[in-house]
Amino acid sequence: MCHDDQKSINVDDSPGFYAIDHYGFPRAGADDPVDPEEYYPAYLQSERFQRFGYHTEELRGGFHWVTSAGYDAAFVVTEAGVIAIDAPPTLGENMLAAIEEVTDLPVTHVIYSHWHSDHIGAASVFGPDVEIIAHRITKELLERFPDPKRPVPTTVFDTEFVLEVGGARLELSYKGENHCPGNIFIYAPQQKVLTAVDILSPGSATFMHCDASQNITGWYEAHAQILEYDFDFFVGGHHMHYGTREQVKLCVEYFADILEGATAAVERFGRSDALVDILAGAGDLRTFVGVENWINSMANHTTRHVLEKKTSDGRLWWERLAGVSTQTKYHAYTVLESIRLERPRPDYRLRGENPPAFQT
Ligand SMILES: [Zn+2]
């Protein structure tokens, strides 16, 4: 029997969930608001989705979107063959099934959005004879960390690449590191479809920590870069939805509020006297607890700012995007840390200038 219930680790009675009540991440629960009803698309009830777990539809002019609930990919049917964009393992061979629903033509080209296995970890289903196009960094990463399910690209580029196949045109562009090094924009100008993966997820607040992104300042820059494209449809790689321009702008607005709240939090709690107050409040010789509370203070300040702020149509964020109350605190932490690590610092210290004394 555990001496301290506060520190016990319990298996929750809901099957499949592991609730940790003191260590680790808190479990989201009944206190969190439900997702907006419009988040759940009608195709979830379709026979195909119920049976095979995937859905596909033509967005425009041979450009098809395909989703396996958690993941989105795409393919373009041309007069000379099919161009696949990504191949998530959750879709796997269902990606082939989706293509075979609409054409007998073979897949001739595959484009990798980025090197992550959750988006291209089934690329080997297209066989050894396809041309695989990706950024040069993606190839370097896949040579360094080989995976037979992710064949090494056969064609690479550095900044711009135009793919023209059977009357279709795709414009590939690399604008620098964002979600990860080598993550590219894929634009279909004829159909006005933009694919940019793991940056924004239409309809939702996206996954924890800005979709596990690496360069948050570059990731924010990508929001503006997305809106520079003239698109009617956006494929973001996740969350069962393609997006309209308005839905993408809503996600951009949400993350602008996170940045605003995090900037205010760093300004307020980043002052050395505020830090000393929080450290002192942790008690003698508990510096680690104090530092954690200092960072938690900034994350909590940011989260409250976003969750209590009226959005552009007067509603709150959880009324407009799915996953807001459960994900916002993780985005808040990630963004405020990126401000402290990646952006210019206000706390440059002059020679002989010391922080306020901290007495243990
Ligand atoms: Zn990724």
Image (cartoon, rainbow, N blue to C red):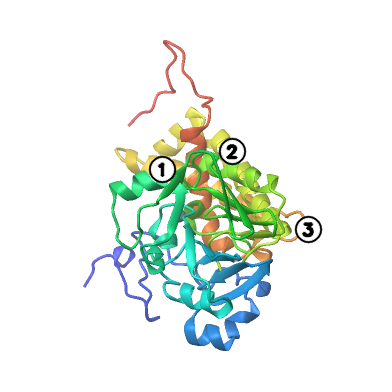
Upstream in the sequence, badge 2 or badge 3? 2
Indicate the quadrant where residue 356 lies.
Answer: top left
Residue pointed to by mark 2: 263
Residue furthest toward the right? 313
| Dot 1: element | helix
Q: Position of residue 349 (x, y in %)?
A: 46, 17
Upstream in the sequence, badge 1 or badge 2? 1
What residue appears at the point 52 percent right and 44 percent down from the top-left corner? 335
Marks 1/2 in contact by CB < 8 Å: the verdict is no
Closer-to-camera residue (338/305): 338
Marks 2/3 in contact by CB < 8 Å: the verdict is no
Separation (CA) of disc 2 from disc 3: 23 Å
Tag 3: amino acid = Asp
| Dot 2: element | helix
Residue pointed to by mark 1: 137
- Which numbered disc, 1 or 2, marks the residue closer to the eye? 1
Q: Which mark is residue 313?
A: 3
Would you call the spot at circle 1 few (<14 residues within 10 Å), some (14-19), or many (20 or more)? Answer: some
Quadrant where the N terminus is found in the figure: bottom left
Separation (CA) of disc 1 from disc 2: 32 Å
Residue furthest toward the left? 1
| Dot 3: element | loop
